[in-house]
Image: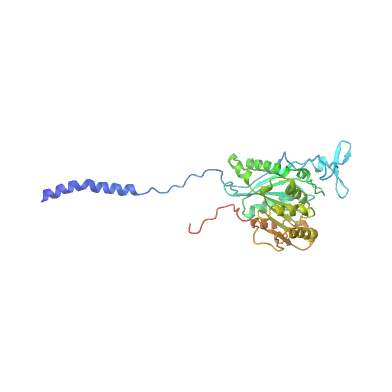
Amino acid sequence: MKRRALLLGVFLMPTAARARTTKQAAKKPAAVAPPVTGPLPLKEAKSQLVAFNASAFPYRGNLPGTNKPFLDAKDGKRRGHTTLKGDVCWEDTTYSDRRSLLFLPSGYNPQLPSLIVLYLHGQGATLERDVQARQAVPRQISESGQNIALVAPQLALDAADSSAGNFWKPGHFAAYIDEAAERLMRLYGDRRAGPHFNAAPVVIVSYSGGYLSPAYALERGGDAHRSKGVILMDSLYGDEDKFAAWAAARRRLGFLLSAYTESTHDENATLQGLLGKRRIPYTTSLPASLTPGTMAFVSCGSWELHGDFVTRAWTADPLKAALTMIPGYPRTVRAKKGT
C-alpha cells in the first residue's frame, strides 16, 4: 500500500504544480494608465499683444454705403477721419495700431471644447489701460472657469470714434478669426492645437461704442456658422436691423444677451420690436443659461453705470457671469458620479 501511495503522489505532483501555474497566469496585471498624448492644459496663463495682418486699422476704404473716403481730411502728408462730432482723428495717431490682445487662462485645455471670445472695446480705449486693466477682461475670463481664448483688436486708439475699419469689409471677420486661431496656437506653443483653435466657435462681446464692428461682422463678415453668440454690454447704439437679421438666421443655433442702461434703452426696445416681427421669442429678464436660441434683454438701470459696465452691471463682473452661463465649455473635466 505504501508503494502504491508513493506512486500516486508522484503522478499527482505535476498536476498540482500545473494548477498553481494556471491560477497565477489567470491573475490580470495591474491596470496602467495610458500615457497622456496631445496638448496638455496650460500650467499658467499666457498673454500677448501682437500685430495682426487682418487688423481693424489702418483702413483706406470708403465709409459703408457711400463713395466718401474714410480718410477725408488732410494736413500736409497727414491723413485723417472726420468723426460724427466733427472732430478730426489722424491716421498716424488713431488708426494705425495693428495690435490685438491674445489671452489664454491657466488650465486652458485644447483637448476640451472651447470658445474664442472676440472682445470689441468702446470709444476712448486702449488695450493695455482699458481692456486689460480697467475692464479686467482677461481676469474675468480666468475666473469664469470656462475654456475660453480671448482675442481683442485695437479699434480707434483712445479716440471718441466707433469706426469699424476693415470690419466694414465683406469677409474680414472670417479673415481676422482665421489669423486669430493661428496666433492663439502659437501663443499656446504646440502646433497640435491648431485644429482645435480653427474649429472653436466664436462669441462676440461688445462694449459701448464697439457696436459697429460686430454689427458689420455679423452682416457681411463671413464665417456665420462660427458665431455662437453675441453679448452686448450697453452697446446697442444703432444698426438694430443687422443684429435682428443675425438673430433670425441663427435663431436655433446662437444666443443674444443685451444688457443695457438708460443710455441704450430705446435701441434695445427697437431690436425687441424687430425680433417680435420675425416671431423670434425673447425674454426681458436674465436667463438661467445662454443656450442656443436664447434671446435676452436685461435692463440694468441708470446711465451712470455705463462707464464701468464691464465690471459693474446687473452684478459685479458681469462679463464673467455671462460667460459662466454658456453651457458645455468647462475648463476641467467633471468627474462622473461614483468615480
Q: Is residue 50 above or below residue 141?
A: above
Q: Nearer the viewer, residue 170 or 11?
A: 170
Residue 299, image x, y percentages: 74, 62
Residue 158, image x, y percentages: 80, 47
Side of 295 relative to 66 (left or right): left
Residue 60, image x, y percentages: 81, 39
For the image shown, how many numbered marks are present on the structure?
Answer: 0
Q: Is residue 291 above or below residue 179?
A: below
Q: Nearer the viewer, residue 35 or 177?
A: 177
Residue 136 visible to an observer of this rendering: no
Residue 245, image x, y percentages: 74, 53
Q: Nearer the viewer, residue 109 or 223?
A: 223
Q: Residue at x 28, y 48 (%)?
A: 20
Side of 316 relative to 39 (left or right): right
Q: Residue at x 67, y 62 (%)?
A: 287
Q: How is the image coloured?
A: rainbow
